Image (cartoon, rainbow, N blue to C red):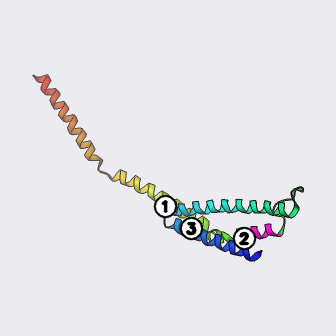
Amino acid sequence: MSLSVDRADQQILQHLESLVQRASSISTLAVLRILNLTHSLCSSLIEDLKVYDATLSSGESSKSTPGAGPLGAMLDHAMEEMFVPWLEGSRYLESENKNLVELYAGLLSRFTRYHVRPHWIFCERELTRIGNGLKSQTKFTAQ
């Protein structure tokens, strides 16, 4: 049983690593979203497995708490170990910080590009149009 769980754990971990690697080529936000999504899906899967194990070990008639047995503890440990590379220490907070810096830099660059545009060209065109309109009005009133 332990061998098949270890093999499944390795397969899930390899798939998770490939997802995170593909997401990191897109953006830091994609990595954070993949980690969040996979964590919630794996948590749901583990809870379902615990409930299934509890019904198998105790039978349908008695109600026992899911995850109370050794399989539940092993699944919890596997879940903790699976996300260690991304949650260890302050790695997750560093990823969040990097994401916020990227988002802020993108917004700031758009703001800067907008305000660096030569707005005087628009003002000059408008003044020329207004000036031409005033000239034409003075021609009609002078005649």
Residue 118 locus on image (x, y percent)? 29, 50
Whether tag 2 and tag 1 are in contact, CB under 8 A, the answer is no
Q: Residue furthest left?
A: 143
Q: Could you say whether the residue bearing mark 1 is in a helix, strand or loop? A: helix
Judge from the rendering whether residue 88 lies leftward or rightward of residue 62; answer left or right.
left
Magenta highlight range: 70-78
Vertical position of residue 7 compared to residue 96: above or below = below
Mark 1 highlights which residue?
Answer: 102
Going by the numbered disc 1, the residue's amino acid type is Glu
73 drawn magenta = yes
Mark 2 highlights which residue?
Answer: 78
15 drawn magenta = no
Image depth: mark 2 or mark 1 in front:
2
Q: Which numbered disc, 3 or 1, marks the residue that appears first in the sequence?
A: 3
> Which residue is located at x 85 percent, y 59 percent?
65
Which mark, by number, is residue 20?
3
Q: Is residue 88 visible?
A: no
Going by the numbered disc 3, the residue's amino acid type is Val
Characterize the local packing of mark 3: few (<14), some (14-19) or many (20 or more) Cα atoms within 10 angstroms: many
Give the Cα separation between the discs numbered 3 and 1.
18 Å
Q: Nearer the viewer, residue 120 or 40?
A: 40
Residue 59 locus on image (x, y percent)? 87, 60
Judge from the rendering whether residue 92 lies leftward or rightward of residue 106; answer left or right.
right
Going by the numbered disc 2, the residue's amino acid type is Ala
Q: Which numbered disc, 2 or 1, marks the residue that appears first in the sequence?
A: 2
